[in-house]
Image (tube, rainbow, N blue to C red):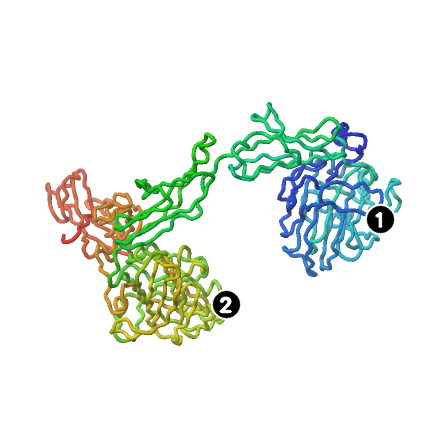
Amino acid sequence: MKPTLFTLLSAVILLPSTISAALLSQDSFSGYTPGQIQSTTSPAVAGYSGNWTGVDFGNVKPAVTAGSLSYAGANYAAGLGNKVTVLNNTTGGEITANNSGRVYRLFDSSLTVTNSTAGVRYLSFLFQSGQETGATTYQTLALFNTDTADAHRNFDIGFNGGTIYNFGVKNVAGTGEDYQNTGVNANTVVHLFVVKVTLSATALSDSVTVWVDPTLGAGEPAGGTTVSGRDLAWDRVALSDYDGNSCAWDEVRWGATFNSVTTETIVPAVPTFTLQPLGYNGSVGNTVTLTALAESAPAPGYQWQKSEDGSTGWTGISGANGATLQFSSAAFSANGYYRVIADNGNPPPATSDVVEVFLTHPVPTIITPPASIAAQVGSNVTLSVAATGLGTLTYQWYKDSEPIDGATSATLGLTNIQISNGGQYAVEVTDHAAEADGQAATSVFSAPATVGVFEAWSGLVSHEPFDIAAGYAVGMLPGQNPTTGGFSGAWTDVDFGNAEPAVSAGSLTYAGASYLGSTGDKASVPSNITGGEITAANSGRVYRMLASPLVVGDNTTGTRYLSLLYQSGQETGVTVYQMLELKNGTHTDFNRSFDIGLSNNGGMTGSEYDFSAEGTYLGTGVAADTNVHLLVVKFNLSATANGDNVTVWVDPTLGAGEPTGGTTISGVNLNWDRLALSDYDGNSAAWDEIRWGSTFNSVTLGSSPANNYAAWIGGYSGLGGLTGFNDDADGDGIKNGVENLFGTNPGVSNQGIVQIARSGNTVTFQHPANATPASDVTAAYVWSTDLATFNAGGASAGGTTVSFATNTVAGTTTVTAAISGTTPAKLFFALKAIYGAP
């Protein structure tokens, strides 16, 4: 016997004589938390090392479940605890990830076997199979060496298909296993498996004998099934259920004699903790549960104790006399150190580990944060927050990180709002419950809500012609970010599909009379008739955020009109979806508030143009074809719940104001903050001339919105009221007026002038260029030798003359400054933005 076994024996000599000195290890699966065996802390069990570990194949791992297996054979010494099992899942097929699983645990040196190990060892366990008829059912306890690869399996036993319990022993060549039938027919009752392993340091001298349900009480029985002349080694045990998911294992015992693993009493007379309590670190108000478990015969009683420092002053807790101590909605006073005494009358009582309960007051929980809103100048806005806590809650609102005087309730009302009221609003919620325990109050900030303020709609508010001359480039829309009134940020790809809408040259041409006409180019995708389902190769979606004037929230009121030109290639795919969409919060289908175009969603057949509002689809009655059509939408918006309605016209008569008729959906709640273009399973749609306005005529007969500084700056939200020509909203040192010349977002910091280089008497530098700067903003390059006096280009001063030349390519202007005359020691250049006449 190995010397390490004497260490194990010395560890149990303090126990009464009723415990078998020959029992090396017993796992009754007591002290485990029911659930997947590899996801719990594995209790200390003699002979094992570390935790149970899941093998990375199969999702149905063996798990601990309450209650032991009950063996009907006479004289068997039953154990305590639970069992390891898996759910029944008769598949009748092959092994899959959904019907299979394996877990293993390493042995320590006392149960590990090498080629030089000698002596006799016994293994027993209880086993039950659900007897599935899967083609490859494999329900076994196995011994592996090095890892759990099949090539390193030295022994396994259980139900491996067929009709008879069997076991496998590593073959002589070491390349697999030889399987032997036990002669016992498999069924669904609980069986006792006993294994005797005779080990020798001599090559090919190990043997294995297996009994199924042997006669107990008279020592080791004769018979059994024996395999001899093998070399065995193992360092771990594994439990596997492949393609069955219905077997169970219990009472895995290792011993030096047959009786030690079958008939001899194994429960100690003195309490021994099989499950130690674990400390708790959490929040006041949580449910705190401490659990310990001790085994003995007779069963022990418990007394939980508490100490302030964990070493002295231990005091019994009244009524805490079970294996579990629980505080429901724990108070701050529950902080401290805990242990439990287990006593069954046999001295000495057992004392558990000392654990700490550490509770702090939680910050309040914000259930509903304030919501962003876009509102018209002069209207009233209400922001609100819903929060919970343990005590009294107080509130403080902030605008752009500065506290608002007197704003100390759960709601914030803004009346007669102006442009200066726009910005980021957040609220700090404070819970004062901790103060009763002498602690500081706790608080939390909400996520900021954007209040965007815009002037009242009048005429045409936004016009998107996808104009290459105005900053678009031929190619995919994602990443393109030309300045367009009413839009904010770049077009963004939705991560599904590789055929995103793209800008292509030439606008759509609408044949209807009196239409204003087209400018610029269009957004479209190439034709790709599939006739099948949506795939990554035939689908794509892009979206762009809307600026404050176009955003719609619950409190938005009034009438808005949208028009667009639309053309479909009329594919016959099973799930054609070619739409312009308005979405809120995210770009997912669930957050789609409105869409229009051609689809077979919501009962539509794809044979007529259709639209939806909040998931309700209606056909327009206009048959779909490959012509260019004018789609006009009227939104009547109300702050009343379910008070919004939508009317759609396809190719309406123009020139006499808003026509009658159309198709209407009523009683909906519309919200949106982004516009998306989607073509799924068609790849041939095209969109152009997306217009927003206050009247029907403004989006069909009207002109483009004013291209002035006021219209440009009004297209950006979140500037904190810093919208003046000489303001610097983003604090990057570049005034808003210059940002207009650059075509950059005045709310996002940028570098400005870059790539400065000198060659002789020539200096070059670069800066971003707005293809369509505001009509009332002009640019001038100036120079100075002292940063005090600036001179215009071409002017002379102190014998020096500087002339400027520019070249703009792909949104970047290169400026060349030519110096003549006296070359000064220092020379400074600047781009000057001029508001109004130069």
Is residue 708 visible to the viewer in this orientation of the structure?
A: yes
Residue in view at x 77 percent, y 54 percent: 188
**Count of numbered circles on the image:** 2
- Is residue 58 depicted above or below 322 in this figure? below
Q: Residues within 10 Å of mark 1 (few under 14, many from 20)?
A: some
Image coordinates for residue 218, horizontal then vertical, percent: 89, 40
Per the image, the residue denoted by label 1 is 225
- Is residue 231 depicted above or below 475 in this figure? above
Mark identifier at residue 244 = none
Mark 1 vs mark 2, CA separation in Å: 59 Å
Is residue 36 or residue 637 the one in the foreground? 637
Q: Residues within 10 Å of mark 2 (few under 14, many from 20)?
A: some
Per the image, the residue denoted by label 2 is 533
Name the amino acid, label 1. Answer: Thr
Which residue is at the far top?
312
Name the amino acid, label 2. Answer: Glu
Asked if residue 239 lies left or right of residue 375, the reply is right
Is residue 348 or residue 830 the one in the foreground? 348
Is residue 113 visible to the viewer in this orientation of the structure?
A: no
Is residue 803 or residue 570 the one in the foreground? 570
| Element at label 1 | strand
* Marks 1 and 2, the one that precedes in the sequence: 1
Asked if residue 314 lies left or right of residue 561, the reply is right
Image coordinates for residue 526, horizontal then vertical, percent: 40, 68
Residue in view at x 60 percent, y 28 percent: 306
Quadrant where the N terminus is found in the figure:
top right
Asked if residue 401 lies left or right of residue 85, the reply is left
Asked if residue 258 lies left or right of residue 440, the reply is right
Quadrant in the rendering for residue 303? top right
The mark lying in front, picked from 1 and 2, is 2
| Element at label 2 | loop
